[in-house]
Image (cartoon, grey):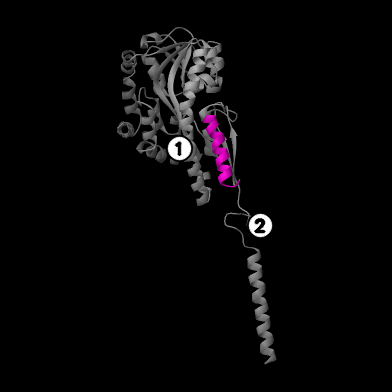
Amino acid sequence: MKKRWGIFSISILLLIMLVAGCSSTTKTEGSGNKEKGEKKEYTIKFAHVVSASTAKGKAAEKFKELLEQKTDGQIKVEVYPESQLGADQEITEQMQAGTIQMNAPFTGVLPSFVKQFEVFDLPFLFKDREHVKRAVNGKLGEIFNQHLEKQGLRAIGYWDGGFKHLTNSKHSIKSPDDLNGLKMRVSQSPLLISQFKAMGAGGVSIDFAELYTALQTKTVDGQENPLSNIVSKKFYEVQDYLTLSAHGYMAYPLIISNKFYQDLPANLQKTVDEVAAEVTDWQWGQAASDEEVYMKTLKESGIEMTELSNSEKEAFVKATSKVYDEFKKSVSGSQELLDAIKDAEK
């Protein structure tokens, strides 16, 4: 009897030791080699090319603030504005390589990765900001994400860059003929180059970070940009004429590395999405209110401002209409994109 009790006691002791040993090595899921209760931390490098004072720059800082707050610091965000980590093209390539996690590039650089983004380079595509917002939050945005994910990227929002206008140092521009012979800086998009070529202007591709110097040294005569960039980069200091043409729209897709996103636990993915949506709403409101401040600054700068009448704008629409044919021939799924934009107009 004593022998049986001794064997039973040893068995109980071994069982207790085994249970104690298992509990001492249990880790929180996703914690790697951290001790029990600790959570794995993540770092997002968020790089962009514009001034921190713009709506986009301020939104990047707000994204950092809210995401760190709502994840209790489990996700940390490092923001690098004003091309500190390179131009948009370089930043996006680094996202694919995994060394940068986020960017909000202007749409003109994205056709190098997803050809379908060339649709944003078409002239007079959107009627107003609300038209844009409906499109990117609907079918158009869905189409883009399908293509972005094939490139290792994911859009978690679309920020408002504003409508583009023309500036130059030669003379006022009121008609397409006034662009004849001017050297205009555009992004590397062939559709933008074709637009200016159709009006007799030469399209020159220059990095945004180098544009002020190019305008100052007369390497180019003029450029196209939203008011936010014209003011924040002080292009009005080296340009004498501004035409409020609203001939194109600049969106800023809020893009995250898809691999980084997929590697996040489900609860953190949800938080990233929620913060992105909240900051996107805030950024659109900020961008709209900033426009009034930019207009005041430009009026005080002394730059000569020209606002096109409906008939004058129609002349630009007619002069650049053939660019749509070029787009349809060169971009796969072009009609689906145009239909999505047309449907969002309603």
According to the image, label 1 marks what residue?
157
Residue placed farthest to the top in the image?
171
* Residue 163 position within the rendered picture, expressed as x and y whole percent measured from the top left: 42, 23
- Quarter occupied by the N terminus: bottom right
Q: Amino acid at mark 2?
A: Glu
Is residue 139 located in the magenta-colored stretch of the structure? Answer: no
Residue 44's x, y, as percent? Answer: 57, 40
CA distance separating discs 1 and 2: 36 Å
Q: Position of residue 303 (x, y in %)?
A: 49, 11
Question: Residue 120 at what x, y percent from top left?
Answer: 39, 28
Give the residue pinned by disc 2.
35
Range of the magenta residues?
56-72
Eyeballing the image, is 80 above or below 228?
below
Label 1 packing within 10 angstroms: few (<14), some (14-19), many (20+): many
> How many numbered callouts?
2
Residue 117 image-quadrant placement: top left
Residue visible at 54% across and 34% down in the picture:
60
* Residue 252, above or below 240: below
Name the residue rendered at 62%, 62% in the picture. Answer: 26
Q: Describe the element under mark 1 as helix, strand or loop.
A: strand
**Can residue 153 be seen at all in this image of the molecule?**
no
Instruction: Specify the amino acid type for callout 1.
Output: Gly
Q: Nearer the viewer, residue 43 or 237?
A: 237
Question: Is residue 57 located in the magenta-colored stretch of the structure?
Answer: yes
Q: Is residue 25 above or below residue 128?
A: below
Residue extending farthest to the bottom is: 1
Picture quarter with the C terminus:
top left
User: Disc number at residue 210?
Assistant: none
Q: Is residue 84 visible?
A: yes
Main SS type for the magenta part? helix
